[in-house]
Image: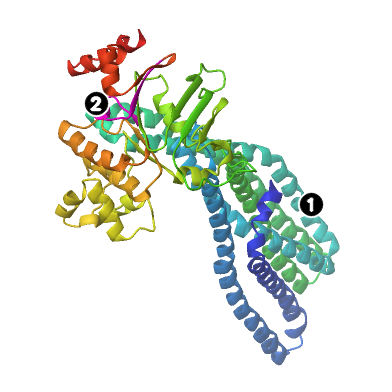
Amino acid sequence: MIKKFIQYYKPHKVLFLTDLLVAFLIAGIDLVFPMYSRTIINDLIPNNNLRGIILYSSIVIILYIVKVGGNYFVGYWGHLVGARMEFDMRRDLFKHLQTLEFAFYDNNKTGQLMNRLMGDLNEISELAHHGPEDLFISLIMLVGSFFLLIQINMTLTLIVFVFVLLAIFFSVHMRKSMMKTFRAVRSKQADINAQLESSISGIRLAKSFANEHFEDDKFSRTNRAHYHSKKASFRAIAMYTAGNNFFIDMMTLSSMMAGGIFVYYGQINYGDLVAFLLFISFFTKPIRSLIQLTQQFQSGMTGFERFSELMAIEPKIKDAEDAKPLQSVKGDIEFKNVTFSYEPGDPPVLNDFNLSIESGKTIALVGPSGVGKTTISQLIPRFYDIGTGSIAIDGQDIKHLTLSSLRENIGIVQQEVFLFFGTIGENIAYGRPDATLEEIAEAAKKANIHEFIRTLDHGYDTMVGERGIKLSGGQKQRIAIARVFLKNPAVLILDEATSALDNENEFAIQQAIEVLAKDRTTLIIAHRLSTIKNADEILVMGESGILERGTHEMLIQKNGIYNRLYRAQFRGYIPDQLING
């Protein structure tokens, strides 16, 4: 784990080593003052050497001015090393999250992932800076002080170091309990973030059901669990700090008491005792730094462990070694003996499924929920991987195509449109981020949304709100269609794109869809049968697969499942029995 952590120092090693060098200089300057005091008291003052006092003091003043610059460098540039490492880790983690498949996000809460990206990595920045620096300075101070103290009085030095060894033993003993409590805090922090994200995102639903008290209770439980985890960590920190401070106080007391006895018996003079006590005062500083570092290390490494856990997750859906880009796409799609289930051991959603779609054709899928219509739409761009069989585009197995080229050639409009917080123009441009304003406007015209945008005070710079809350369902759908117009894919997938709209919006969007689907291979998943009458072929799906297929007229004349479904819909009721038997 530590080896992985050290890898993040490499891009910043010059600045890091410079920081350590400056820290070494600061530590060296701190060691000068006690020896200066010893010389003043034992030599210069008794000999009335005023010139020597002024000279030595001037040198120390110069060193302290140098120390000011060193402290500034360490305080600013040293912290930047930690901030840059945190930046690198957050960049790597976000990039890694982009590679993980839909199934990963199906099983993980957004708030917990946000906590991994933000909360867990916050402590790492401080550890990355203070960890090596404090350890390095403390070791220099301890080793330097030890050798200088021995020169003053070996017996007194050994007495002091007994308490140093006791403090080290105590710190090692407390390490496991501290790590355990910090892990618990991180876990509960992730839980409370997930609860917050869920509750705030669903605030409108909570208010519509008058369930604010229910949300309060849910949050209180999570908040209380987080409080108790912090309470346990504070208890461990308090025991650790109190114990170590006791040993430091005993070290100071023992040096004073033993030093006084040694002066009484003439084994040490006053100048040496003052220098010794000054060294002890400097000596306690690195020990306290090491105590704080141990606490910081446990907290930081706990965050890094959780970071590493996520980084270690290998994407299950990725480019094969022989993957090639999909080029010059016609749009022929073929499902061949495809079997798929979302989780291992679950009943298959598709079982030995076969389907061929010719390029440029519009195919519609109808049927009750749970028969695999949306699943089919998600398998084509490889959002999930099939169990057995194959899916091919233009005769090429999609598993041997690069994911980016595959998805760049597929446009998707879903019933639940997701809009990013930003402007209307930015959301349309998501279809092609380098598009010009003229191209964005042209796409909006094709999607029948341009005239509406023109009526807004800020036009394409109008903010849509969180997830497009300031827009109606029909307006969001048309922005999503404009986004796909801008992308200009060879294959188009429409998943219940008009099912939640009123008749007026449905008509406007249906017109836009017909323009969008022209000369593209189009797969429409529909609930409203009126929107698919012009499809080249309609597939009626049931639990056993494709039950009927043909044009709207053919299926009406056949007087089968589709006919009964169509007539039932216009009477306002669609029982599943019409399809399932």
Q: Amino acid at mark 2?
A: Phe
Q: Quadrant of the C terminus?
A: top left
Q: Is residue 199 magenta?
A: no
Q: Which mark is residue 460?
A: none
Where is mark 2, residue-wise? 209
Q: Quadrant of the N terminus?
A: top right
Q: At 74% from the left edge and 61% from the top edge, which residue is drawn?
A: 139
Would residue 302 appear left or right of 328 to someone viewing this image? right
Over which residues does the magenta segment extend? 524-542
**Disc 1/disc 2 C-alpha distance (Å):** 67 Å
**Circle 2 sits in a helix, a strand or a loop, which is it?**
loop
Would residue 319 appear left or right of 540 to someone viewing this image? right
Q: Residues within 10 Å of mark 2 (few under 14, many from 20)?
A: few
Measured as percent of width and height from the top left, residue 188 is found at 50, 35
* Disc nearer the start of the sequence (1/2): 1
Q: Amino acid at mark 1?
A: Val
Measured as percent of width and height from the top left, residue 116 is found at 52, 43
Where is mark 1, residue-wise? 162
Residue 159 appears in which quarter of the rendering?
bottom right
Query: In front of the other: label 1 or label 2?
Result: 2
Measured as percent of width and height from the top left, residue 546 is found at 41, 18
Residue farthest bottom in this picture: 51
For the question of whether residue 337 can be seen, the reply is yes
Residue 288 appears in which quarter of the rendering?
bottom right
**In the displayed structure, would residue 62 be above or below residue 449?**
below
Measured as percent of width and height from the top left, residue 144 is found at 77, 66
For the question of whether residue 387 can be seen, the reply is no
